[in-house]
Image (cartoon, rainbow, N blue to C red):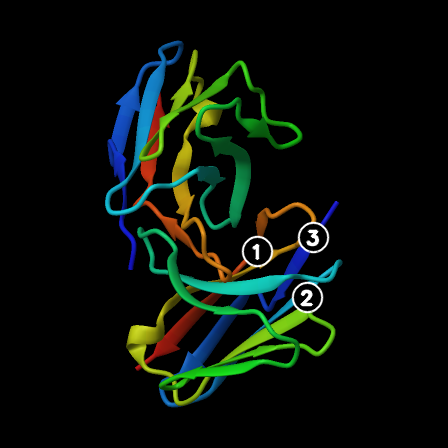
Amino acid sequence: GQQVMQIPQYQHVQEGEDFTTYCNSSTTLSNIQWYKQRPGGHPVFLIQLVKSGEVKKQKRLTFQFGEAKKNSSLHITATQTTDVGTYFCAGRTSNTGKLIFGQGTTLQVKP
Amino acid sequence: GAVVSQHPSRVICKSGTSVKIECRSLDFQATTMFWYRQFPKQSLMLMATSNEGSKATYEQGVEKDKFLINHASLTLSTLTVTSAHPEDSSFYICSARTPGLVQETQYFGPGTRLLVL
């Protein structure tokens, strides 16, 4: 079945360093979404990418969707302690309409 | 953005009892709602897709007789965990899909933490 792989599983960075998480799908996606989940909380929608090669920015966060619409990345510039949490990508295929989540990348930021 | 609520937020029950979890879309009508389960330090696993007025579609490996889903209205879906056992202890999260948009978005409820003793 459809799989969405996300790496790395964990990342510890010093405050001010950059962070990137990568997401790869076994099938072509109609869109990909990114969520952030704080410890003890629920996933919060960050952004959706639809177009091939699309790049979107939200302040220090940069989201990319690959040309083949099978991979995506989230890059955080100059991390802050408020960036701590688990970042999930979730891909949707056009044929099923289901949103399949990656395993998540848990980010720890040392002050 | 759209708001999805869940009730209860936390529940502790004895093994063998049934627990009902409600998911409501507060400011929009959701023709489709999804139920996910998340074990500690793991990702969200889709359990079933709930469509208003029709039977839910369950993912492979999810027992439909154990996890009863009812989507009686455009703003309410319920998940009932029947004869709960300790291994059913988990974080159950619903989400609702905004209808009628080219770029659909799913909004998640705050989740329900179930502990079965």
Q: Which residue is mark 2?
A: A24
Residue under the image location 44 percent in, 29 percent down? B52
Screen quadrant of the N terminus of chain A? top right
Q: Name the subunit of mark 1.
A: A
In the image, A73 versus A51, the foreground residue is A51
Type of amino acid at the residue the image marks with label 1 = Gln
Q: Residue furthest front?
A: B100
Residue A43 vertical placement versus B72 (above, below): below
Q: Which residue is mark 1?
A: A103
**Label 3: few (<14), some or many (≥20) within 10 Å?**
few
Separation of disc 1 and disc 2 at Cα?
Answer: 11 Å
Which-is-in-front pick, marks 1 and 3?
3
Q: Which residue is mark 3?
A: A3
Residue under the image location 32 percent in, 36 percent down? B112
Q: In terms of secondary structure, where does tag 3 sit?
A: loop
- The location of residue B117, given as percent across then percent down, is 35, 20
Residue under the image location 27 percent in, 27 percent down? B11
Q: Quadrant of residue A16?
A: bottom left
Separation of disc 2 and disc 3 at Cα?
Answer: 8 Å
Screen quadrant of the C terminus of chain A? bottom left
Q: Are marks 1 and 2 in contact (CB under 8 Å)?
A: no
